[in-house]
Amino acid sequence: MFVCVDYGAVTYNLTRPEGQPSIFDKFNYTEDDGSPIEIASHCLRHYLNMLAQMGGMSSAEIALFSGRKDVSQNRAYDHMTSDEVQEPISRALRAGMNGALVAKEPRQLIRRSDFPLANPTAAHSTEYGSCMHDFASEPCQMYSDCVNCEEQECIKGDEQKERNLRSLKAETALLLMEARKAVTEEEYGADIWVAHQLKTLERVNALLKILADPNVPVGARIRLNIANASLITNADAKPIHVIRGNKKVRLK
């Protein structure tokens, strides 16, 4: 009869349970010192990841191949020695390559208004440019995620900073649209980016709303209350302006 190959069938053939011969015993395979070979099934997962690393697959590809949520989880499976890591470079040098190992490309500068033309998908927009990623990677922990930081203060009346904030809103809205499109196409990891871009857009909109409020004086210091994303407080000694939903409450 045909039966499904279950976990036990694989494990028993690898580990010699209760003295039973393993698949290595059946084919007379032993360790170099003649001792029996025993291997845990999880070791094969490490071995496959090693083959992928040595074969030149990217971190994102290995994470997808292994069913991982975060590319940082690849590190525990990377057992390449320093010689193996350097081998591609050594091979290139032996083949006669000299000078710069990375080809120089001319810098391509674009205006911030042309950001949509760069076809961003999973990306971070910064004060200085943008960081392009893929949906298999989680939003970068090194990204200066200032709009989601409760220590950042915005000063009402700083026109350049407000323009930057409006640019961030437009760029985040574009990135959110791309992330939602990726979710409908069932692209791995896109749902995490949707949540991140939604949170950022919500807080940018809240900041812009308070900056546009004529009852908030010019020069007021505006700070996000991250414990409750719907609250934005004026950190001056003046009365605090709090936004709850669509209602504005004046506190003393």
Image (cartoon, helix red, strand yellow):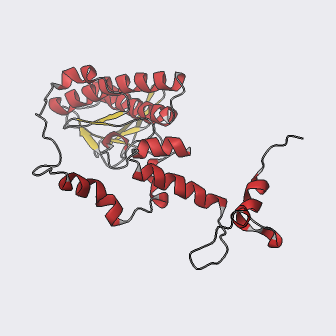
Residue under the image location 81 percent in, 68 percent down: 20
Q: Position of residue 66 (x, y in %)?
A: 54, 46
Q: Residue at x 38, y 32 (%)?
A: 122
Q: Nearer the viewer, residue 28 or 113?
A: 28
Whether residue 68 is visible, yes or no, is no
Horizontal relation, residue 177 to residue 2: left or right: left
For residue 3, side relative to residue 228 (left or right): right
The quadrant holding residue 232 is top left
Residue 176 at least partly seen:
yes
* In this view, 37 is above or below 132: below
Between 180 and 159, which is closer to the camera in this rendering?
Answer: 180
51 or 34, nearer to the observer: 34
- Give how far across and how far down residue 34 sits, in percent: 62, 78
Q: How many marks?
A: 0
Residue 119, by quadrant, is top left
State the residue in front, 168 or 205.
168
Q: Check the image and name the residue furthest to the front.
A: 28
Query: The C terminus is located in which quarter?
Result: top left
Q: Residue at x 43, y 37 (%)?
A: 231
Residue 58: name its quadrant.
top left
* Residue lying farthest to the right in this orientation: 1
Q: Residue 162's spot in the image, x, y percent?
A: 22, 29
